[in-house]
Amino acid sequence: MSEFKKVPMSVFPWEEKKKEYKEIKGDEEIVKRQWEEFDMFAYLFLWFLVTAM
Amino acid sequence: MSKLYEERMDRYWKANHREKPDKVPFRPFAAECVGAFYGLNSQQVTHDVDQGLEAVIKMCREFDIDATVSNMVYVWTGLTESYGTKYLGVPGIDLEVGESFQYREPRSDDEAWMRADDYDRFIEDPAEFTLNVWAPRMSKYFAAPGETNTWKNNLAWLKGGIGMMYYIMKINAHVQRMKDEAGVVSCLSGALKAPFDILADKYRGFRGISYDIRRQPDKVLKATEAVAPHMLNNALGGADPSKKTPVSHWMHRGATGFFSEEVFKKFYWPTLREVTEELWKAGYQTIYYAEGKWMRNLKYFLELPENSIIYHCDKDDIFEVHKVLGRKFAISGGVPNDMLAFGTPEDVRKRVKEVIEKIGSEGGFLLDAEAIMQQDTKRENFKAMADACDEYGVY
């Protein structure tokens, strides 16, 4: 069997979001991390809708 | 209470891993019966989650339970109504107050949340499809991109998101109460659905998937492969950080009454096996809660790593199931639901004694009913089950 292909817990990836910024003046990693954390909540909510309720 | 909890966790963990604990754990999956024990009807425990959770605490305090589900009435219809779910029959609204909530299957392709010609989009990105197509179809309020937005749409998403976080907070606090006030282990954490099951249950419906496996089998296969990593993520997202409790897995269309072995082998098993193995690699056992009859398909589960699952037996002969799976996996179940509803405490005691003697004597067994216990389970029979486990289950 071929290796299992995992996917990120993401709906609106950082790479897409970053395009909306003209520039990021400060630490990009902070901005990225916070964005991805909230995006993960949205991802898990979506699958919660499907699987849990 | 802390000492009692640790004893029960140790007992639960050992039984799940086919070691011999001090006694057989009593691990009931008690659903609407919990409400019935304390004078609450289905509407009360399903629509008002606080009443449902309080009833679970009372049950944990009253009976000698080692581990149980934090909330086996798993759909909080107060929450699902807030974002306008269409597919549920709700006790107290659509149904009588004493009836359990119902999932309403789509009766035609027009009613299905995913249509027969939606496969390509689903396969391309199941999360995108779920957000932009499935959710607007299954909700009275969600608007799809391109449709006219409404204030009800905005509010429904807000309520749904806040509601989910609110529910998780309540469950976390509730699990702590189970531990602190009764020393009882919350027996599951995280939820897996087989990729074929989620497709059949929530997207195409049973009628739809039955046609699809004949008319577009390659797309069904690709759809299960596309959604599999999301099922893994969903399970991991809610899993126990300490890895002491298993992930739940409610199993439906792989039961032998629905589809042939050919269908099971081709569509149901491959991606389920992959996801189960990935969970095991991540450190988690999975409870295969196999509702219905699965005897013909058990041989496939033997392909899984030893102890990667705990197999729950419903309608099959548990003694035969043990012969097939007991050398690799722990087994749970044993007491028929109709016995709990229509039998006597003496019937239950005899059955518990028999099951423990025949398959529980070497460890790797957890006592439970065959299926989730609903409002017809008699309180005296539930007590007989708990007491008999104490009497006959000591090693």
Image: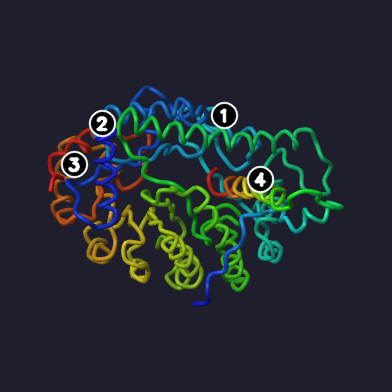
Do callouts 2 and 3 mark residues in contact (Cβ within 8 Å)?
no
Indicate the position of residue B25 as horizontal and vertical percent values.
24, 45
Q: Which mark is residue A38?
A: 4
Q: Identify which residue is drawn at 59% across, 45% down.
A: A49
Question: Between marks 2 and 3, how big is the CA–CA gap?
Answer: 11 Å
Does label 2 lie on the same chain as label 4?
no
Q: Identify which residue is drawn at 23% across, 55% down.
A: B364
Side of A23 where A31 appears, left or right: left
Disc 3: host chain: B
Does label 1 lie on the same chain as label 3?
yes
Q: In terms of depth relative to the viewer, which is nearer, B192 or B103?
A: B192
Does residue B168 lie above or below B302 as drawn?
above
Does label 4 lie on the same chain as label 3?
no
Question: Between marks 3 and 4, how big is the CA–CA gap?
Answer: 46 Å
Depth-wise, is mark 4 or mark 2 nearer the camera?
A: 4
Q: Amino acid at mark 1?
A: Ile
Indicate the position of residue B383 as horizontal and vertical percent values.
23, 33
Q: Identify which residue is drawn at 41% across, 35% down.
A: B175
Q: Which mark is residue B389?
A: 3
Mark with earlier residue (3, 1): 1
Are there few (<14), some (14-19), or many (20+) residues within 10 Å of tag 4? few
Does label 2 lie on the same chain as label 1?
yes
Does residue B85 lie above or below B130 as drawn?
above
Question: Between marks 1 and 4, how big is the CA–CA gap?
Answer: 34 Å
Do callouts 3 and 1 mark residues in contact (Cβ within 8 Å)?
no
Depth-wise, is mark 3 or mark 4 nearer the camera?
A: 4
Q: Which residue is tagged 2?
A: B63
